[in-house]
Image (cartoon, rainbow, N blue to C red):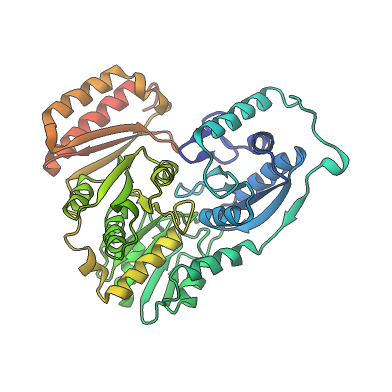
Amino acid sequence: MGTARFGTDGVRGVANADLTAELALALGRAAARVLPAQSFLVGRDTRRSGPMLQAALSAGLATEGADVVDLGVLPTPGVAFVSEQRGAPAAVVSASHNPFPDNGIKLFAPGGAKLAVALEESVEDELEALLADPARPPRRPTGHGVGRLLADPGGAAEYASHLESVLDGRRLDGLSVVLDCANGAASEVAPGVFAALGAEVTAICDRPDGANINDDCGSTSPGRLAEAVTAGGADLGLAFDGDADRLVAVDHAGTVVDGDVLLALFALDMAARGKLAGEKVVVTVMTNLGFRHAMARHGIEVKETPVGDRHVLAALDVEGLALGGEQSGHIVFRQRASTGDGILTGLNLADLVVRAGRTLTELSDGLVERVPQVLRNVAVPEPSRLAEAESVWEVVTEIEAALGETGRVLLRPSGTEPLVRVMVEAASAEEAEDAAGRLQAAVREALSGDCP
C-alpha cells in the first residue's frame, strides 16, 4: 500500500502515487467482501483524481457482486445522510481538507456511521490479502451475479431537503452571510440551502475546476473569507473544507471563530433550551483547556476522546448524548447527523445568531479564555515510529514536569498525513513556544531518517 493506509479517516495519500487505481479496485473488492450488501453508495468531492478513483473503487465493488449507486459530487455528510436513509453502506472519495494532489477513500457502515475500528481492520486485512493474491477465494460471480453501476443524482436533493428542515421551521431572513465553499463539495448545495432559508448569500470559492480545492481557501485558510465579510459588511462568514464535514466561522469584524468556541456556543445554547442531553459535551484531546474551564463554569461536563469524529460519535452514542466536536470544526449534532457536518453546523450557528439577536462577536467574546496553545506539524517519513522513540518521550517527561498543572503536552502521529502533530499548552505563550520547539526538534532528530 505504500504510504496510503487506514488512518483516522480512511485510506489517504497522493492520488495515482500512494492511492492508485489498483489500490482502489482492491479496496472495493475488500469492502464488498467484509460488508456484504446488495448495493453500495459512492460519492466524491471535486478533485481531478476523484472520477478515476471512484471508477476503480466501483469496479472493485461490482466485481464482487455489489450494485454501485453513484451519488456524484456530494459532501461527505451528505453521503452519510443518504446511507442512513437507505440503510446501505457507502464510500466517499475525498481527502477532506488536504491539498489537491491528495485523495482518499472513507467507508460508512449501513446507517451512515464510519466503520467501527474492528470492522475497518477486517477490511484492511482483506485488502492486504487481495493485493497479495488477487485470485483469493471465493471465486468472483459471473453473469447476473456481476454488480451494476447505477447513477442516482437525486441524493443531493435529499440531503438539501434534510438540511432545510433542521431549523424546525425557523428562517434566516435578514441575515447576510458569506460562504467559502473551498471549491469543494459544498459549492452547489450550501449556497442553495442558505438561500432557501432566507439568508442573503454571497458565495466565494465556489467554482471548482478539479485542481483548486482547498487552495488558499476554506476552513484551513479563512483569510479570504474574512476579507469578503468585512468588505461586504456581512453579518457572518462560514468556511467549509473540501468535503464540507467541518466549519470555521468569521464574525462581522473578520475575526476567526474556531471549533472550540463554536462548540461552547452550541453547548450553552442547547443547555439553555433543555436540549443538551446529560448536560455533557464530547471533545477530543486537542480541545483547549480554556474550553474545559468555560464548561465547568456553566456546570457542563466534558467527556474526552482521541482525535477523530469517529471517536466523538462513539462516545455520544454510548451515553445517548447530543453534542460533540473537535477544535478543527468537526461538530456532531447527533440527533441530526451521524457524522460531522459543516453545512449543518453553519445553519445552526446562523440560527443561533438570529434567535439571539446579537452578533457572533457579542456571543463569543470572552466565552472561552484560551490557555496559550502551540500546534506544530513535523514532517517525518514514518510517523507510526513515534511510540518507540524513547528520546522524544524523555523530552516530553521533562517538559511535563516543568509545566506541572499549568499546561499539558500531546504528541501523536497524524492519521491522514506523514506528520507528527505536536501540541503544547502552557501558562504563557513563551513557555508554550519554547516547549513546542524543543519537542519539534526532538521528533525531527529521532524520526527524520534521511529526510532533510
Would you place residue 354 above or below residue 440 in this image? below
Residue 176 horizontal side relative to residue 17, left or right: left
Residue 395 figure quarter: top left
The quadrant in which the N terminus is found is top right
Give whichever of 9, 421 is nearer the camera. Answer: 9
Q: Is residue 268 visible?
A: yes
Residue positioned 78% across, 49% down in the render: 148
Locate residue 335, reporting x and y percent. Answer: 44, 57
Counting labels gives: 0
Q: Is residue 211 visible?
A: no
Give whichever of 306, 177 is nearer the camera. Answer: 306
Give whichever of 405, 57 is nearer the camera. Answer: 405
Q: Residue furthest right?
A: 143
Residue 427 horizontal side relative to residue 229, left or right: left
Locate residue 381, reporting x and y percent. Answer: 43, 27
Locate residue 73, reporting x and y percent. Answer: 60, 58
Residue 76 horizontal side relative to residue 63, left or right: left
Would you place residue 172 above or below residue 382 in this image? below
Residue positioned 40% across, 35% down in the render: 414
Residue positioned 20% across, 69% down in the render: 362
Residue positioned 49% across, 77% down in the render: 196
The quadrant in which the C terminus is found is top left
Locate residue 369, reporting x and y percent. Answer: 16, 53
Would you place residue 360 above or below residue 84 in this image? below
